[in-house]
Amino acid sequence: MLLRGMSIPDRNYARRLVERTGYYRLSAFYYPFRRFCEVPGEQDKVRCDRFREGTTFDDVAAFYLWDKQMRLEISDAIERIEVAIRASIIEVLGSLNPHGHRDPRSYKTSFSTAGEDGATPIDKFTTKLEEAFRFSKEEYAKHFKRRYAGPPPIWIEAGTWDWGNMTHILQYLDEKHKNAIAARINPSLPRKNMEAWVGALNSVRNDCAHHSRVWNKNLVNSPSFPKTSDFPEFEHLRGKHEKGATPSQKLYGALVVIAYLLKQFHPQTKWHIRMRDMVLGAKLPPEVGLPTAGFPEGWEDEQIWK
């Protein structure tokens, strides 16, 4: 059976996968296999409804399952990174006082500047944190609310933060505190790179949490990398890539960040080895091959993956 040029060897399997997954969701995995066609009035070719010659439904299904496997591996890694960065924020801000995350002195002055409604960004932010803690069902939160009055200290309240909260905090922290957090990862790591990494991984984490495709699309927030010789792991990310994009604009850039952070927080980790071997063992059609995810030629020989 052919569907707009796509071969469907097993109609029952295809029907079951579409029913379990949803046609619209699965269409994101069809997309790379569609032809490019010329359209009158358009300078560039666009994707047509018909598929490239030789495309099978099995190609689409394999790509869908591969992307799921990637999301599971990435989610496992980001969970550990999230916990470690949260602990660093607690240590740095908690050294100021037990409520250092609520203290205006921890942040840029703009975070304490009232808007047209008379409220300051820090007031709005801490109100959201209070609501999250108040409605939390976690035992430690219920215990604190039963025993104590007033806002919880940072080492308790941080348990209800998500990655978005951490991103917001890091965005507005003053330079001194950002530098202190970056130094816990590597004393030479510039705070701007650390902040960019958190923003990039927040987007990837959201894609994983919402079961969105991650493999062959541009990152919403691209990570930046230190330009000094102190970080040879990132030197290979400088070159141009497919259609002028750099590897850091694709999933590969995020994977490099994840591998580096895990090595810093957990020196005995083997995640990077597992990821490298998993990718090397993948059997992907050219339409969704390694270059589409930003993997440069010879990537497996780079220091970050050893």
Image (spheres, grey):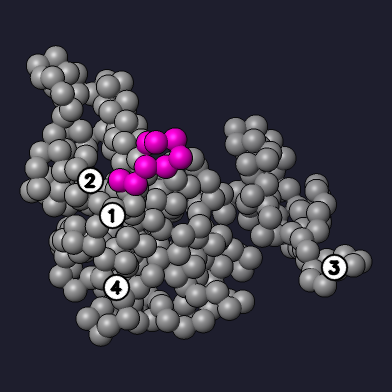
Q: What secondary structure is marked by label 4?
A: helix
**Cβ atoms at labels 1 and 2 below 8 Å apart:** no
Which residue is tagged 1?
Answer: 108
Which residue is tagged 4?
Answer: 304
Examine the structure image and report whether residue 115 is included in the region drawn in magenta. yes
Q: Report the span colored magenta.
A: 112-119
Q: Is residue 274 above or below residue 227?
A: above
What is the distance, in whole Å, between disc 2 and disc 3 at their CAs? 53 Å
Which residue does the image show at 28% across and 59% down from the upper left?
Answer: 271
Q: Nearer the viewer, mark 2 or mark 3?
A: 2
* Residue neighbourhood size for the residue with mark 1, other residues' Cα within 10 Å, grouped as few (<14), some (14–19), many (≥20): some
Q: Amino acid at mark 2?
A: Pro
Which residue does the image show at 19% across and 43% down from the upper left?
Answer: 103
Q: In the image, residue 6 lies at what x, y percent?
A: 76, 53
Q: Is residue 93 above or below residue 54?
A: above
Which residue is tagged 2?
Answer: 104
Q: Nearer the viewer, mark 1 or mark 4?
A: 1
Q: Is residue 99 above or below residue 284?
A: above
User: On the picture, is 218 further left or further right than 180?
Assistant: right
* Residue neighbourhood size for the residue with mark 2, other residues' Cα within 10 Å, grouped as few (<14), some (14–19), many (≥20): some
* Tag of residue 212: none
What is the distance, in whole Å, between disc 1 and disc 2 at their CAs? 8 Å
Mark positioned earlier in the residue sequence (4 or 2) = 2
What is the distance, in whole Å, between disc 3 and disc 4 at their CAs? 42 Å
Mark positioned earlier in the residue sequence (3 or 4) = 3
Which residue is tagged 3?
Answer: 42
What is the distance, in whole Å, between disc 3 and disc 1 at their CAs? 47 Å
Q: What secondary structure is marked by label 1?
A: loop
